[in-house]
Structures are given as C-alpha cells and as structure tokens.
Image: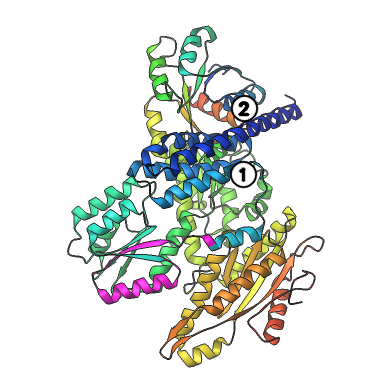
Amino acid sequence: MSELERIMHIEDDPSIQEVARVALEIVGGFTVMSCASGTEGLENLEAFAPQLILLDVMMPGMDGPETLARLRRTAFAASLPVVFMTAKVQSQEIAEYHQLSAAGVIVKPFDPMTLADQIRGIWSQSHG
Amino acid sequence: MASADLQAQLAELNRSFKARLQVELQSLRVRSEELLVQPAANAVSLAPLRAELHKLAGSAGTFGFAELGAQARALELIATRCMDNNVLSSTDRQELLTGIQVLPSQLNQLAMPPTASQRAFDNDDNEARCIAIVEPDGQLLQGISETLESFGYHTIICGDADTMLSIVAEQTPDALVVDMSLPQWDAQWGAALEQVQSQLPAPLPLIALSDQDGFAAQLHAVRAGAQGFFTHPVDLPGLENRLEGCFSLQQSEPFRVLVIDDDAELARRFTAVLAGFGMLAETLEAPEQILEQMRRFQPDVVMMDVNMPDYSGPELAQIIRLNDEWLRVPIIYLSAETDVQQQMAALIKAGDDFITKPISDSALLTAVYSRAQRARRVSQALARDSLTGLLKHADIKDQLDLEADRAIRNKQPLSVAMIDIDHFKNVNDSHGHAVGDNVIRGLANLLRQRLRKVDRLGRYGGEEFVAVLPNCFPADAWRILDSIRSDFQALPFSSDAGLFHSSFSAGISFSQAPDWQADGLLESADKMLYKAKQQGRNQIIAMPGSDEPGN
C-alpha cells in the first residue's frame, strides 16, 4: 500500500481551512492544497494530483455530494478516496454518505490533534 | 515536528477565529432580530439562521469553544424542527432569539463554567416538562394528572387519540402517556403516531397503559414504540419513575468508553471516532494500571483487543471481573480473530461480546452505543431508590468519594449537604405511611428540580437525603438550600384531615482551599444537621469557616 502524502481539502470556511492545514501538514506531515469551492477543486485536480480528497458537505453553490458526483465523472478522480466532513451527527446521514461512495466521514467539530490519525485510518481501510 | 510551535500556531488560529466570531455573532444577532421580531416571521425565515448555526456547531469545537458549539447545535435543532413542521411557535421564536443573543458571551467563557450558584438559581426558570395524556377512564386520568402535576410536570389532557396526534405535531410535548384500551387504538393509529414521531428530531418517550396484561398487549405496546407499560390499576409513582428514567437517559452525561488495544494508532482512531459522536473515550495507558484507570474514568463500556503482546484481552477481562464493582460494565472484545473456537474460548473466560475487525465507523458506534445505553439503564435501575428515584445509600456514598477526590484533583470547592425532614415521625403517625411517602417524594422532587445536573442526590435513610455539590462554595450551597427550604415549607400536602405543611433542616460541610478534605464530610454535615435540629429545625447550618449565616 502506498503512503498517503497529498491531500486536497475543499472547504468554504477559511478558519476551518487553516486549522485543517495545520492539523494535516504539521501534525500529520502531509502536503495539503486548500480549495474554497468544488469548482476550484475540480480546476486544480490534475495539476495537484491528490491521493485523497477531504470534502466539506455543506457549501454554498456546489455542495459536497454534488462535487463528489462531478469528481467521479473525471478520469482522475473516478475512484479516488473522498472523505466527507460534516457537522451532521445522525448516523443515518453518515450511512447515506457512505452510499455515495465516500471512503469515510469525519464529524465536525474535529480535534486538530487527531484529524491526521482519522484520515490515516480511513486511508488504510480504503486500501485494506 | 516542534510541538511548542504547533501549540503556538493552533493558539493563534483560535485567537483569530475568536476575533472573527466576535464580528459574525454580532451580525447574526442583528439578523436574527430582523428576521424573528417582525410579525410575518415564519418557519421559512429560519433558513439563513439555521445555516449559520449549523456552521458554528461544526466549527466552534475545533477552536476550543465546545460550549458555544453545543449551544449552536441546540439552536440549530430547534430551527430544524420548526422548519420540518413548518411551524414557528412563540416559545421557539423566543428561545432562538434569546439563545442567539447570549452566544457571544460564550466567547469569553472559554473553559470557564458559570459559578455554581448562578447555575443553580438559573434552574428556577426551567420550564416544566409537558406530558400529553390520553385516558378514557376519568378517575384514572385525574389520578395520573394530579400525580404528575405534583411532581412538577405540566399535563395536557387529550380527548382522543387524534387530538394527541395533532398536539404532538404542533406543541411538541416532552412525553406521551397513552391508554391502549382506547376503542380508536388500532394498528392504523399506531402507524400514524409513528409517522408523526419520525418527523421530530428524536421520538418522544411513550408510556403505554392497558387493561390487558400478557404478551399480546406488551407486543402491541412495543410495536407502537412504548418505553414503559403499565396495566390497570396503574402504579402512579412507578409511572412517574419510568418517565423520569426516560428523561434522565435523554439528557445524561456522555457515555464513557475505555479502549484497550496495543496498536496505538488504531486505539487513537477508535477514540476519535467515538469522540466525534459525543462519547468520552480513553485509551488504557498501562495495563498494570487498569483498575486505577477504571476507578478514575468510570467507563460505561470497556472495549478491548484479544491478542496483545504482554497480557491477553481475556486476562485483563478476568481481572476486571474479579472486582464486583465493575459487574455492571460490559466488556466487548474487538479483534481480528475470526476463528469461532478462539472467540468462544475468550468469551468463556470473561467478556460479554465479540466484534471482529476491521469494522466500519458506524458499526463500531452502534455496537458501543447500544451496549453503553443498556449498561446505563441497568446501573440506574440498580442504583435508584424505588420511592424517590434518587441514588441509594451506598451509591451516594460512592459518588461522594468520587467527587471529593475529583474536587482535590481539580482544585475546585465541593459542598455536601445532609438534609432531614422535620418531625417526620409525626407525619407518619398522624397521616399514615402513604402520606409520609408523598412528603418524601415531594422533597426528593423539589431537590432534583432545583439542583444542577452535575449535583448528586441520594436518599440516605428513611427521611434523610444527601446532596453532593461539585464546584460549589459553601456560601452558594447555603443560599440554594435555604431557598429550597423556604419553598418546601410552603408546599401543601393533602391528607384525610385536609392540607398540612412540612419542613426540613440541613447541615453543610465542604472541602475547599486550603483545607482539602476527602474524608469526614458526611460526619461534619451530620453534626451541622444536628445543630440545626437543636436550634429549632427548619433551618440550614454550614460548617464554621464558610462565613455563612447560621454559624
């Protein structure tokens, strides 16, 4: 199984963008590209070539599930692990995201100290 | 990675998040007033507010403002319920307005809980819980309604099953009591109730009554989603007790899970997944310290690996089972072991259940949640006094020991009150034991309503109670108890001879800087209680050194 290095984070809230970058780059040692919208993520997809995409569910304009659907239509991200981030807590919704072919779901608020571990866990599962 | 550098960066992010929120919360407040104060406000107007609250609920915790996030979540749920039902009641509107108004104050209260007395008195404003009842038998209806009212609940009486359906949809009572002997009660109505319940954020507790006993009637109740079942003649205190049980499960503390796995990364991951769903999870640091850690952490569930290098899971499970105090705690093995023989061998030694890894997050959560919930219920049933629903003698003593240790560890004051009903023997002698029981329950209920959720309350003896008040200075304890004393004195009780009043006395002891006490708190409180009795009863006396009246 290859090592996870490059993560694309699509999230409209700049504060969350920053704290996730610190959590993933400094705590986790990953390389992160932050995108403020699904459109921006799609535009940078091939240039950045992420191994995993972390995707906020509720965004203005194109939301998480719609972004995921568009990603799946690209050659590059057709089977890339995509992890949803959501403030919803009902397990039924979490199950729905899994059905949308998400590799995992991270529940907000997340703990910056353990976010990288959570992502690693999902990464090893999706390659297990 | 320089960890000091990381902490500095995170702290800086928290600071800028706070600065940003100071502006955003103000504008949210202004917008909420614009949207909600105008007469044309309706559920649809809530959409932008809900979106903001949702965002806050998801982000604030990451930046260290967990309480702010929790409050935003509570408000988001209110808004969601209003939007789903397409009704904006004046109560909900007020709650949203007030809730949004006070959000900014949370920004300055990072890890600073309000003082004990402030919160204890805030409880006065708690709205009473509202119970909707359908019961065709007029006399029984009156009995249920009076009993529940005397315990501080509001009751709504519904003429028939359909009325209840519309009330559930509109007013949202907090629980339902339904007599299934009703002629209208049939499968269709049960389905209609389930449909209405499914629209709510969480289904309301439902207690079923019936003139039939036995399997068929109970199955009927379970299919309608009942959490309690009583046959005629209905045991009224039992009914109240069941309701209280439903509510205390709803608002109880987060479940605590101890995770034992030699794969530190996996253990951390499980902990994070459980924490993401509001449970408190800890990993076992050193197997040799397992009992100490359990005593400190008080888990509801233990989850452990089977094959670990130094000690096996079954060995650790057997050590736990050598101690009676942990009999209530389920032990779940979580292991890659798929050999059924091996699984059974582990279970025969100790442990209650076997789950195989790898496991999805949602399966893990369901497995832990359902066992924790069951363990809580069992603990509650075992630890509660059947007359008052308060902790029993031995359990309140345990709680006191725990809180006394915690107070010393956290350097927070702790107050303990010993409470005794005055001239209780006279009440029993002149009005009979049934009336005496009502007085005991009346005081238990008043204490439960007026003290905080974090406070521990027990029935210590016949008419004697113990209250343990963490993070509470004796001065605050004295004030809240004295206000309960004056309310209790005014509470009328009825007997065959008409109405009468009762009263209580209390003694308060405490542990605070610089004289931290772990032992002797009950004895000291008892001495002060004795003094209060000697000085004429119906009064509260605190231990010397607390600068309070009554010394």
Check disc 2 and report the residue beneath it.
A19
Residue B262, position as x, y percentages in the image: 61, 37
> Which quadrant is home to the N terminus of chain B?
top right
Circles 1 and 2: CB atoms closer than 8 Å: no
Q: Position of residue B13 (x, y in %)?
A: 66, 29
Q: Residues within 10 Å of mark 2 (few under 14, many from 20)?
A: many
Q: Nearer the viewer, residue B8 or B210?
A: B8
Q: Quadrant of the C terminus of chain B?
A: bottom right
Q: In this view of the protein, can residue B336 be seen by the observer?
A: no
Q: Which residues are magenta?
A: B125-153
Report the chain holding disc 2.
A
For mark 2, give the secondary structure. helix
Residue at point 23%, 51% (across, down): B191
Labels 1, 2: front one: 1
Left or right of residue B61, residue B550 in this image? right
Q: Are marks 1 and 2 on the same chain?
A: no
* Magenta-colored stretch includes residue B133: yes
Callout count:
2
Report the residue that reaches farthest toward the right.
B514
Q: Which residue is mark 1?
A: B106
Is B521 placed left or right of A46 in the picture? right
